[in-house]
Amino acid sequence: MWLGACDKSLEIGLCSSTDGAAPPGVRIDGGTGFVFPWSTGFETGFCGYAHPGGFCYRRGSATYELVTSPVHTGNFAAAFSTNSDPNNQGIQARCVRQGTFPKSAYYSAWYYIPSAQIASGTWNLMHIQGNDTPTSAARNLWDVSLVQTDSGQLRLSVSDYVNDRTPTLSNEEAIPTDTWFRVKFYLKRATDATGEIKLYQNEDLLLDWTGITENSNWGQWYVGSYATGLSPLTTTVYVDDISLSPDP
């Protein structure tokens, strides 16, 4: 599944302040590195993504906006709404950090998923892709997505494009719907087979893989919703308290 590099054709996000002002955001296409550590709880709107090295975007009829309910902490959260209707399609709305990846870090966000089903297709919550330079072709690295079990429950899944595999998680517990839960992805970059990835749901470790070689000089971290084939067709994912941290 190619999720698409963010280029100049994408919509620049608004840096909306809590007093209702919405000055244009700043998009940085060649940042030298992530601000690290970094976090945003959307208390100053989407300004946490405006500078440096970040932006928010939508495609087609998809939308992203601030909401006051539900929120995980504080007064605001972000709502990413997608539409799987092929006649009014808007399959992605997301925010992106871009630049040089830290050598090792935890990529974390809190999600609130409504009761919905995957009729067919994909429901991606977090995506990481890498490049050799900011202007070179992007390559998919890892996805954290939702998949549906035979019983109709939703659970997390990892797609590892580096090694072309979908690992079996050690604990394939269902995610809670209509309540907040945390997705945390750990990435240790390496030029040899000493790299590592981990996936947590809340504080439960679902995946710990070592022996990974991946050391992209530049990359992008997507958070939001990329969805096709959902029921209902229009579905909103709420996100709050996003962080990029050296600590779990």
Image (cartoon, grey):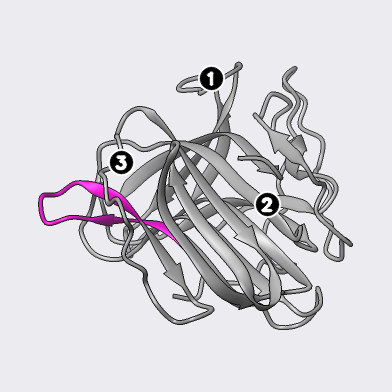
Residue 96 visible, this angle: no
Residue 105 marker: 2
Q: Is residue 93 left or right of residue 132?
A: left
Question: Would you say residue 145 sits in the magenta stretch?
Answer: yes
For marks 1 and 3, give the CA distance: 23 Å
Residue type marked 2: Ala
Q: Position of residue 186 (x, y in %)?
A: 58, 54
Say which residue appears at 77% left-offset and 80% top-offset.
Answer: 132
Q: Three-letter amino acid code at disc 1?
A: Thr
Question: What kind of element bears circle 1?
Answer: loop
Q: Relative to 48, say whether 135 is above or below.
A: below
Say which residue appears at 80% left-offset and 46% top-offset: 36
Give whichever of 217, 72 is nearer the camera.
217
Name the residue carrying label 1.
68
| Amino acid of disc 3 | Ile
In this rendering, the count of numbered labels is: 3
Q: Which residue is mark 3?
A: 175
Q: In the image, 99: left or right of 130?
A: right
Which residue is at a point 61% across and 59% down the rendered structure image? Answer: 187
The percent coordinates of residue 109 (x first, y second) are 55, 40
212 inside magenta stretch: no
Answer with left or right where residue 202 lies relative to residue 212: left
Residue bounds of the magenta highlight:
144-156
Residue 51 in sight from this viewpoint = yes
Sort mark 1 into few (<14), some (14-19) or many (20+) by Cα contacts within 10 Å.
Answer: few
Q: Marks 1 and 2, how far apart in space?
A: 29 Å
**Foreground residue among 147 and 119:** 147
